[in-house]
Image: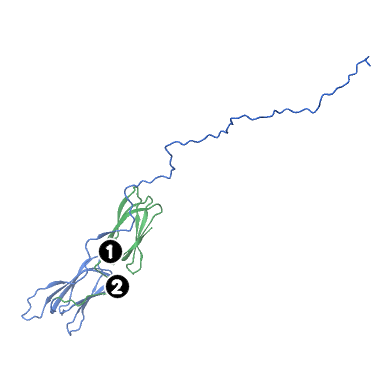
Amino acid sequence: MGFEVNHAYRKVSLLCDLTGSWTLEFWTELPNGVQRAVYSVSLAPTTGEMPLNIPLAGNVQGKTPKLRLRGGTAARVYGCKILAKPVGTLGGEGSAWVWYTVPIEVTPELYSRATLPIPGTPEAWAEAKLPIPGTPEGWAEAKLPIPGTPEAWSDVALPLRKSDVLFEWVDLPVDGVE
Amino acid sequence: MELEGKSMEGVGQLKDVTLTYQAPSGGTLQAYTDMPGSTLALRRTITLPATTGEREQKTFPLDSPSLLEGKLIKWRASSAGTLILYEGSVRARKVGLYIDGAAGETWETQPLSLG
């Protein structure tokens, strides 16, 4: 914990990537003890990530500065510092200008690798059986389609036609005999 | 084939994407993000060159003309022929401070006590 000390402010350094124009405001409570924007500057679009050194007016002072960045497009801020030194203390000014870091969540320089949600395909091959019915090693007995022949004999009638005419006596005519 | 969307806490920046795939007829990889504008929309279309081998690994940049950004990211892969995706990865980082002015956002610090 530190005590709030009056400081003079000289510069703001931004490491940023600005799409379109933006406005940076520097707020302090001096003079009059009321927080207000005491300095405002327009920032031109940047070409990718680059540092911007923004000089402030020479009379910017205060105990509790505040920064405000506003615009209508996209801004990425990777770092921010304020060049300041304590002033107004008894015994004169012996302090040097110091860069104070404004707390901003750090953007890592390096990219980390994240996997896409693609189900894995194994490098190795798995064995799968083809749907071929099995062939047994042993042999099974199967009968040939030959009709059976009975061991016993059976009677079979011959195909002879019966004659209905019986023999009868017939007189033969012989000459000279009465 | 759509790969489910990935949500990042904060705004993510994507540097490149690496795919291991097989596509004898080639294919297309599309990247959808929700930035700028807070609406999931097509931001990049990448042509996947035709492959001759089974598993070919290729890396495609996502930083030209600018880094691909978003809080939500969705991928879509397609091909006129067969496309087999074996694996893939993307290089990404989270932006410390992203201000979307189009959505009315401003950056304003708390009063700083320099000590």
The image shows residue B24, relative to residue B2, as above or below, that is above
Crowding near pointer 1: few (<14 within 10 Å), some, many (20+)? many
Q: Which residue is drawn at 27% across and 64% down?
A: B13
| SS for callout 2 | helix
Q: From the viewer's perspective, is B69 left or right of A177? A: left
Q: Give above or below for A168 relative to B46.
A: above
Q: Check the residue under mark 2 and report the chain it is in.
A: B
In this rendering, position of residue A175 left or right of residue A142: right
Mark drawn on residue A31 = none
Chain that appears green: B
Tell me what residue is drawn at x 29 percent, y 73 percent.
Answer: B101
Chain letter corresponding to the colour blue: A
Q: Which residue has dot 1 on it? A: B13
Residue B85 visible in the shown view: yes
Give x and y (percent) for residue B103. Answer: 31, 73
Using the image as rendered, state which of residue A53 and residue A111 is in the foreground.
A111
Q: In which quarter of the image is residue A47?
A: bottom left
Q: Note whether residue B74 is visible.
A: no
Residue B67 sits in quarter? bottom left
Q: Quadrant of the N terminus of chain B?
A: bottom left
Q: Distance between the residues labelled 1 and 2?
A: 18 Å
Query: Circle 2 sits on which residue?
Result: B101
Give amino acid for label 1: Gln
Among numbered discs 1 and 2, the one appearing first in the sequence: 1
